[in-house]
Every structure is written in structure tokens, then in C-alpha cells.
Image (tube, grey):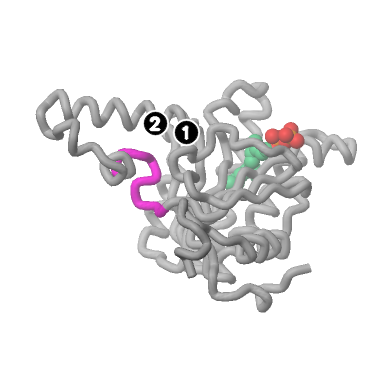
């Protein structure tokens, strides 16, 4: 088990997590999927506190994808209720740890109660600056890219922007993640090795870490383990090893 003292100063600035396996966790125990999601919220708290402890500046969690709208209505309702209750309960944790809440995705499509609660916590934590916790809600990377292309096209059409001035910075400015740096480390739990339409542009140079642990069982020591693994890797960004040294 990796302890935080074993991590060196090379802490990834932005860690993103695909929290997967709530349903399988419940099934294995003969419980309803809702109980899996409920226990998933405990893992969320573990990881948020653990990330703040080791000074990760940005943590982004994939809480609900655009594709998740295709799940049974009852499960969607459970997830939205859990979101509201967690926000109500965890605002204390966010304030105590000086964490700012942020959200990315098509927030207009969320139920009003969830959206209002979310916006309220975002407002209340907006001056916190130890870490930014971003929840991806009704988020899909392709939808985000379509929105970005549409917004840029309108600017070009209205002669506000010239096509040859479109560069990475312009694209970044129009993404939901506008104020976030690129992802350094992407973690996915539950043994699946897919990206599932999450932050496709932003993970261009991210290190990928897959673990078989089901999300409700994921503890802060598992986050430390992922960070430790990240610290053993050489990130070359297209250069050679010699150029880096
Ligand atoms: C994946 O498990 C998880 C989700 C679809 C949602 C993640 C939600 C939570 C952890 C709880 C609420 C979140 C917050 C931020 C309060 P799955 O259902 O896809 O698992 P399976 O693949 O085993 O079926």
C-alpha cells in the first residue's frame, strides 16, 4: 500500500477519473445497483480528500455521461438524487478543504433541482483555491467538440475571428474545460480499458492508468498508488529521452 509520504514532488496537476463498476460491485454482493451508486459516493469523498491531501490542483470526475441518459429512468433518478444529497452533505468537506466546485457538460439538461443545488455550491465555493473539483455531468466529449465548432463557426461567420487564427488556445477557450489545464493522469476503475467519450481533446498527452478495483472499493491509497505509478513514467511529449535529460 502506497502512503502519501512515498510520493515525490512530481504530483500530477490534473487528474481525471472514470468512476466505473458501481453496478458490478452491487451485483457481486446481491444488492440493488442503487446501493452500488450510494457506496460510489463514499469513494468520491475518499478521492476528493486524498487528492487535496497530496496537493493535486485539479480533480475531474466523470459522474454522468450524455450516454447515461439511456439508462432506466429509475436509475437516472437515483443518480440525480444522490448528486443532490451529496452536494448538500459535502459542501462542508469542500469548505473545510478549501476546494472550489466546478462543473462541465450540458448542465441545462439536468433536472432543475440538481442544477440549482450544483450552481449554489459552485457559487458558495468560488473563492476556494486549494483544489478545483470538476464534476462532469451530462458530459460527452463529442458533444463538447460540436458545441466548440459551432461557437467558433459563428465567430468566423460574423467576421469576429479569421479562420487562420484558429489554434489550440482558441479551441481550449470554447471547451467546457476552458479554465482547466490538460489532463496529466487519467484513471479508470473496474478493469475496463476504454475512454468512453471523456475529455478526448484534453487527454492528448495524459498518462493512462487502469485498475481492476470497482469504484465503491476505491480508497485514497489507491489514488496514491496511481500517482506513484505516474511518477515512475517518463513523459516525453513527442521528444526523445536524451532531449529530456
Ligand atoms: C459507473 O458505474 C458510475 C456511474 C455511472 C456514475 C458515477 C456516480 C457516482 C459515483 C455517484 C454519484 C456521484 C457524485 C459525484 C455524487 P456503473 O453503474 O457503470 O457500473 P457497472 O459498469 O458495473 O454497471
| Residue 60 pos. (x, y %) | 52, 50
Tell me if residue 46 can be seen: no
Residue displayed at 47% across by 33% down = 141
Callout 1: SS? helix
Q: How far apart are the two marked residues, 1 and 2, measured between alpha carbons?
A: 6 Å
| Residue 109 pos. (x, y %) | 45, 28
Task: Classify 235 as above or below 141.
Answer: below
| Residue 75 pos. (x, y %) | 67, 29
Residue displayed at 60% across by 28% down = 68
Q: Which mark is residue 141?
A: 1
Characterize the local packing of mark 2: few (<14), some (14-19) or many (20 or more) Cα atoms within 10 angstroms. Answer: some
Q: Are marks 1 and 2 in contact (CB under 8 Å)?
A: yes
Q: Does residue 160 appear to the left or right of 214 in the view shown?
A: left
Callout 2: SS? helix
Q: Tell which of 4 and 169 is nearer to you.
A: 169
Q: Does residue 210 appear to the left or right of 107 in the view shown?
A: right
Characterize the local packing of mark 1: few (<14), some (14-19) or many (20 or more) Cα atoms within 10 angstroms. Answer: many
Classify residue 174 by image quadrant: top left
Tell me if residue 221 can be seen: yes
Q: Which mark is residue 145?
A: 2
Q: Residue furthest bottom?
A: 5
| Residue 212 pos. (x, y %) | 78, 46
Magenta part of the chain: 173-181
Q: Which mark is residue 175?
A: none
Amino acid at each position: 500500500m502506497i502512503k502519501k509520504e512515498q510520493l515525490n514532488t512530481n504530483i500530477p496537476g490534473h487528474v481525471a477519473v472514470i468512476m466505473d463498476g458501481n453496478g458490478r460491485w452491487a451485483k457481486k454482493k446481491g444488492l440493488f445497483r442503487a446501493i452500488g451508486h450510494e457506496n460510489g459516493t463514499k469513494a468520491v469523498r475518499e478521492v476528493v480528500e486524498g487528492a487535496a491531501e497530496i496537493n493535486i490542483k485539479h480533480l475531474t470526475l466523470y459522474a454522468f455521461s450524455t450516454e447515461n441518459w439511456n439508462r432506466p429512468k429509475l436509475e437516472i433518478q437515483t443518480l440525480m438524487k444522490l448528486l443532490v444529497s451529496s452536494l448538500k452533505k459535502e459542501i462542508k468537506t469542500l469548505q473545510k478543504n478549501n476546494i472550489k466546485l466546478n462543473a462541465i457538460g450540458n448542465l441545462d439538461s439536468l433536472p432543475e433541482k440538481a442544477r440549482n443545488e450544483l450552481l449554489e455550491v459552485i457559487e458558495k465555493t468560488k473563492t476556494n483555491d486549494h483544489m478545483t473539483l470538476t464534476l462532469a455531468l451530462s458530459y460527452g466529449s463529442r458533444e463538447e467538440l460540436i458545441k466548440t465548432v459551432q461557437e467558433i463557426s459563428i465567430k468566423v461567420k460574423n467576421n469576429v475571428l479569421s479562420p487562420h487564427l484558429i489554434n489550440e488556445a482558441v479551441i481550449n477557450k470554447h471547451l467546457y474545460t476552458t479554465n482547466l489545464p490538460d489532463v496529466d493522469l487519467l484513471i479508470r476503475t473496474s478493469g475496463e480499458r476504454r475512454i468512453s467519450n471523456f475529455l478526448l481533446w484534453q487527454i492528448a498527452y495524459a498518462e493512462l492508468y487502469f485498475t481492476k478495483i470497482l469504484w465503491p472499493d476505491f480508497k485514497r491509497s489507491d489514488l496514491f498508488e496511481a500517482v506513484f505509478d505516474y511518477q515512475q513514467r517518463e513523459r516525453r511529449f513527442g521528444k526523445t529521452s536524451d532531449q529530456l535529460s
